[in-house]
Image (cartoon, grey):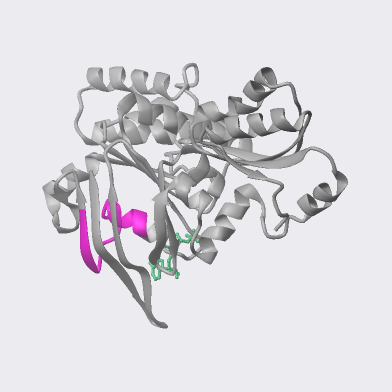
Amino acid sequence: MISIKELQKVFQSSSGNVQAVDDVSLDIEKGEIFGVIGYSGAGKSTFIRLLNRLEDPTSGEVIIDGNDISKLRGKGLRHARQEIGMIYQHFNLLWSRTVKENIGFPLEIANVSKQDREQRVNELVDLVGLSGRENAYPSQLSGGQKQRVGIARALANKPKVLLCDEATSALDPETTDSILDLLTDINKKLGLTIILITHEMHVIRKISNRVAVMEEGRVVEQGDVLDVFRNPQQKVTKRFVEQVMGDRDQDDSLQEILTQYDSGHIVKLHFVGEKTNQAVISEVAKQYDISINILQGKITQTQKGAYGTLVVHLTGEEQVIQEAIQYISETSVKVEVNPNAS
Ligand SMILES: Nc1ncnc2c1ncn2[C@@H]1O[C@H](COP(=O)(O)OP(=O)(O)OP(=O)(O)O)[C@@H](O)[C@H]1O
């Protein structure tokens, strides 16, 4: 759907050149939610603005659905832009217009007839869950509702791609989750390709299929979200994973736990993907006559299933414990018996 090749953006300023995007190449598939994460100044905003030509690239290509956006001009560019919706951190709504009028604005610009506009706006109000608030002004809405207007407006011209520029950064955690749920829902319902930029790993974990990590204008790591969680390569990526999972290296409480139990077995279960595997504990409890005591754990959900670890203490007859461990090993949960704390 989107192919980005050797993309570069250099800003020239009185204090010298800034290489905001440095040789970025990425392929994004139709219908996927692709996240780009980086700290402030990494080049994320510039990168996403290059995708709909709010910025002109210094060099490189951005091909969206067969069109090289970086080379289009005039009418061709306007047409291509209608296929790319965008939502913003601060919503960018028209304050003197109602919800309905904000959503209908891109349709007005595209010369859609009043009757068709009315129908489309009503559909969109429904889709984003704003029924009953159509005639409110932005100042009368909560942050989450404002972003819902932003989303509806971005979808007005039925784009193929939705760009999200830190779309939840101005929202509280609960509202963030409701907006992320809405984006996931829209992605599934409409098959829309979504690219989002963020500095929060929570956002990536919750809705992205794949992720690219940016640092100093470059993509330093990319892959499936679960793979990146499981095996982050770069220091910056490890810091992002720690935002969600905590710092494994500094977690010394397991050492303490291990010293407290001298009978039975301590077993560490590693969950990577596949939603069904979370049932493994209750299955073992049902099938084997042993006690399972959960000692410690952190499991988080991604679009491709659970990720995390659970430390459990198994007690009972040695033979039965071994059978239970064997049973778990045959699922895709990885088992570590009597793990080291480190
Ligand atoms: N118009 C501009 N002129 C000059 N330099 C710019 C311009 N826009 C961005 N930059 C510089 O490019 C670099 C990348 O900025 P960018 O805003 O893309 O990063 P970011 O990852 O989105 O960070 P933030 O989340 O803080 O916006 C920064 O060093 C920034 O100062």
Residue 16 locus on image (x, y percent): 38, 82
Quarter of the image with the N terminus is top left
Residue drawn 34% across the image and 22% down it: 121
Residue drawn 49% across the image and 45% down it: 204
Q: Is residue 115 left or right of residue 265?
A: left
Which one is in front, 32 or 249?
Answer: 249
Q: Is residue 301 left or right of residue 298?
A: left
Residue 52 counted in the magenta span: yes
Q: Is residue 274 left or right of residue 155?
A: right
Residue 322 locus on image (x, y percent): 67, 34
Residue 244 visible in the snapshot? yes
Q: Quadrant of ligand 1?
A: bottom left
Number of marks present in the image shown:
0
Residue 342 locus on image (x, y percent): 70, 58
Span of residues in magenta = 47-62
Which one is in front, 118 or 184?
Answer: 184
Residue 39 visible in the snapshot? no
Residue 181 counted in the magenta span: no
Residue 73 locus on image (x, y percent): 13, 55
Q: Give the image quarter of residue 157.
A: top left
Which one is in front, 120 or 258?
Answer: 258
Q: Is residue 278 above or below residue 211?
A: above
Which one is in front, 71 or 101?
Answer: 71
Q: Is residue 75 left or right of residue 321?
A: left
Residue drawn 42% across the image and 60% down it: 221
Q: Give the image quarter of residue 46.
A: bottom left
Q: Is residue 89 above or below residue 143?
A: below
Residue drawn 27% across the image and 51% down it: 27
Q: Give the image quarter of residue 252.
A: bottom right
Q: Is residue 92 above or below residue 332?
A: below
